[in-house]
Amino acid sequence: MSRSQPKPHHSSSSQPAPAAGQYTWAGRFSEPMSDLVKRYTASVNFDRRMWRQDIRGSLAHARMLARQGIISVQDLSDIERGMAQIVGEIESGAFEWSLDLEDVHLNIEKRLTTIVGDAGKRLHTGRSRNDQVATDIRLYLRDSIDDIEVLLRQFQSNLLDLAEREAATPMPGFTHLQVAQPITFGHHLLAWYEMTRRDAERFADVRKRTNRLPLGAAALAGTTYPIDREFVAAELGFEGVCENSLDAVSDRDFAIEFCAAAALLMMHVSRMSEELVLWMNPRFGFVRIADRFCTGSSIMPQKKNPDVPELARGKTGRVYGHLSALLTLMKGQPLAYNKDNQEDKEPLFDAVDTVTDTLRIFAEMIRGVEARPENMADALRQGFATATDLADYLTRKGLPFRDAHEAVGLAVRRAEELGVDLPQLPLTELQAFSPLIGDDIFAVLTVDGSLASRSHIGGTAPEQVRAAIDRARSRFS
């Protein structure tokens, strides 16, 4: 029995084959991509924000190809001319983005080929979309971190200005949201500054690991062309190259690290926001926030709502979600590149946008925060804020601290019964709790005395607050 011969394939037997050049992979496929798949897999609607980075990366790659003799000098000239035209078209809004071309990379390459012909087709020599997109996203994130660092610095500067104005303004410090000890408002604001200082350090650290060049890894194994990766890295301002081609195209640690740093920053912003919301409440009344950062009520005309801090608390959860999404995205992927990685961009882009917008508005809002010292002083008079100072006084007189702690607790209970603060108790009442108490105690029990006594690095004494502000500002120079 003779074996049947295979029938010749006719592309017209089902759907027509795609026109040559319609897709970069058209030669391999016998039918066009379905519209449903096209919509599902396309990323151009969100990744086109990387167009500047894509063009920068392509130009550096083209210069390297020409330098190595892989393409001609004329090809390079044509590519540079075409890219300059594309930049103008995108900036003017004349560029037509096509869903058929799937992403920012193919859209730009197709337009370049239309403008300059074969030179545009030669641009992709020695690279893959895998290392191309990995390069673009690193360039994009590096640029974004630089922008964030500027905004963070502006927020810190405005925060220090407010802290300096309020360096000696007494307010209650809280633990468990109960009045604990006197501090100054400036000292409290400097705690916020220290949070953002760590944030700045984290972003700088993320930038170092982001700033490595993947280009040259090609699809996953490198390329047969005699490329010069170090040249491209220098052209694009990268500090080095990714040294394993598999890792270069599949690594998204830098995006995860960024989202982790962003989540920590937003957590700090959320804590600040919570305090601003509390302090705006009339029960506290510690601050006013300028009207331009607040809203009113559609039904209650007396309301002034701190919407900006409230919304920042909510947006914090959004960034947490992006971190979780990226970790989940990467956890099950084998090496090397997988289409899953297309899902890295929207969480990353939104995290960048959220942090950027939040820092921009907070830098302005902090300039519209005004302290209300009279309300802060009233709160200090209600919470026995100098009780620890009395215990320290007795300890310095020779009483063991635990015994001093007990004696002061009894004194606080007595003051509470009488409805007065500790400094308002008569000397004879105080001496009933310890004979070591003399008439010098009243200087110790004042708020100003309490503040002044904590004069060391990190302490709340006004002179230490001012010194801390000076140190902070010196780091900006």
Image (spheres, rainbow, N blue to C red):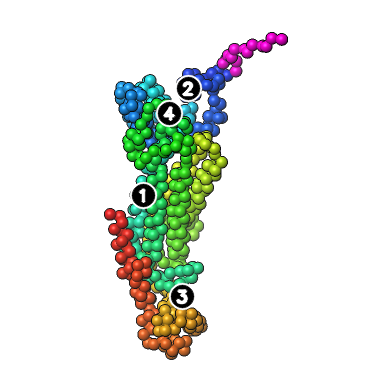
Can you name the residue that lies furthest to the top here? Answer: 2
Which is nearer the N-term, disc 3 or disc 1?
1
Out of 134 and 446, give the one closest to the viewer.
134
Q: Nearer the viewer, mark 1 or mark 2?
A: 1
Bin the neighbour count of mark 1 within 10 Å (Cα to Cα): few under 14, some 14-19, many 20 and up: some
Give percent across and percent down for residue 194.
39, 59
Tell me the kind of residue under disc 1. Answer: Glu
In the picture of the structure, the residue carrying the numbered disc 4 is 223
Tell me the kind of residue under disc 3. Answer: Gly
User: How far apart in space, not on screen, are marks 2 and 3 (Cα)?
Assistant: 75 Å
Which SS class for mark 1? helix
User: How far apart in space, not on screen, are marks 4 and 1 (Cα)?
Assistant: 36 Å
202 w.r.t. 431: above or below: above
Tell me the kind of residue under disc 4. Answer: Thr
Q: Are marks 1 and 2 in contact (CB under 8 Å)?
A: no
Bin the neighbour count of mark 2 within 10 Å (Cα to Cα): few under 14, some 14-19, many 20 and up: few
Which SS class for mark 4? loop
| Residue 149: image tag | 1
| Residue 260 appears anywhere in the view | yes
Q: Are marks 3 and 1 in contact (CB under 8 Å)?
A: no
31 w.r.t. 234: above or below: above
Q: Nearer the viewer, mark 2 or mark 3?
A: 2
Q: Nearer the viewer, mark 3 or mark 1?
A: 1
In the picture of the structure, the residue carrying the numbered disc 3 is 383
| Residue 270: image tag | none
Magenta residue span: 1-14
Q: Look at 50% across and 32% down and name the residue there.
A: 42
Q: Nearer the viewer, mark 4 or mark 2?
A: 4
Which SS class for mark 3? loop
Q: Nearer the viewer, mark 4 or mark 1?
A: 4
In the picture of the structure, the residue carrying the numbered disc 2 is 22
